[in-house]
Amino acid sequence: MGKVLVLYDSRTGNTKLMAEYVAEGARLVESAEVRLRHISEADGQDLLWADGVAVGSPTHMGQPSWQMKKWWDECGVWGQADGRLGAVFSSEGGHAGGAMMTCLSLLLILMNFGILVLGVTDYAYYCYTLHYGATTVRQPRVEGDIAACRELGRRLALAVRAGHINLREDHETGPAMHSEKPADWS
Ligand SMILES: Cc1cc2nc3c(=O)[nH]c(=O)nc-3n(C[C@H](O)[C@H](O)[C@H](O)COP(=O)(O)O)c2cc1C
């Protein structure tokens, strides 16, 4: 137990560098096995391999990149990842450029997949919180940015080590299996 996928998109390398620090933080946890993957190198099986996933995207118009959204649209494992753990991060062009909104959008995607999302209440560094995910302006270059990315990965790996719940198994026995399908349901 302890597999972490760091899945990212990046057009100009800034989110990629964040992802590398997130992966570095996850590796600080003993026994963590970490896969660092650009979306072009990953498929749904990588998601199913992982107990926890950290997802990062550049902020594009206050949203994740369309390529990141497409990856989730097409990964083909919706309904199979329930109970895994997730956390998010984003790079933006300037302060208040929407990275937090990108994080929230990414969290919505994870929730839609049944992934349990991780909030972090304490500070990663002076003036740096990770309540909804890690954000940086352009590339992480100052200590606080780097500490935030590393801490996101470390926390996720710690939570994963504590154990994710495989809620997929519950599909077979959950209440939906026993409800009657209406005649006009399509
Ligand atoms: C199509 C596009 C839309 C963008 N929209 C925003 C935005 O809404 N807010 C912002 O702060 N930066 C915006 N940016 C800038 C990127 O978020 C920023 O440069 C980021 O660091 C890029 O990360 P990357 O190097 O991983 O691609 C946009 C960039 C592109 C290419």
Image: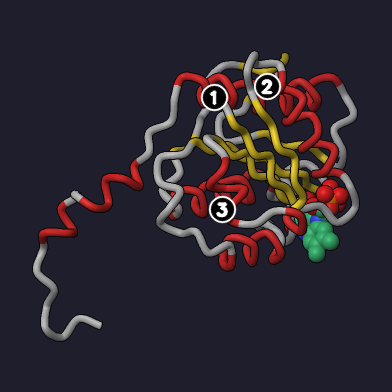
Foreground residue among 178 and 91: 178
Callouts 2 and 1 close, C-beta under 8 Å: yes
Element at label 2: helix
Residue that numbered label 1 is attached to: 120
Q: Residue at x 73, y 55 (%)?
A: 39
Type of residue at label 2? Answer: Glu
Report the side of 106 relative to 95 (left or right).
Answer: left
Q: Classify mark 1: residues with Cα within 10 Å, few (<14), some (14-19) or many (20+).
A: some
Residue that numbered label 2 is attached to: 151
Query: Where 106 falls versus 4 (above or below)?
Result: below
Question: Does residue 66 appear anywhere in the picture?
Answer: yes
Report the side of 142 relative to 46 (left or right).
Answer: right
Q: Quadrant of the C terminus?
A: bottom left
Type of residue at label 1? Answer: Val
Type of residue at label 3? Answer: Ser
Element at label 1: loop
**Residue 124, horizontal then vertical, whole percent:** 67, 18
Question: Does residue 93 appear anywhere in the picture?
Answer: no
- Distance Cα–Cα, label 2 vs label 1: 9 Å
Residue that numbered label 3 is attached to: 105
User: Ligand 1, what quadrant?
Assistant: bottom right
Query: Where 138 falls versus 134 (above or below)?
Result: below
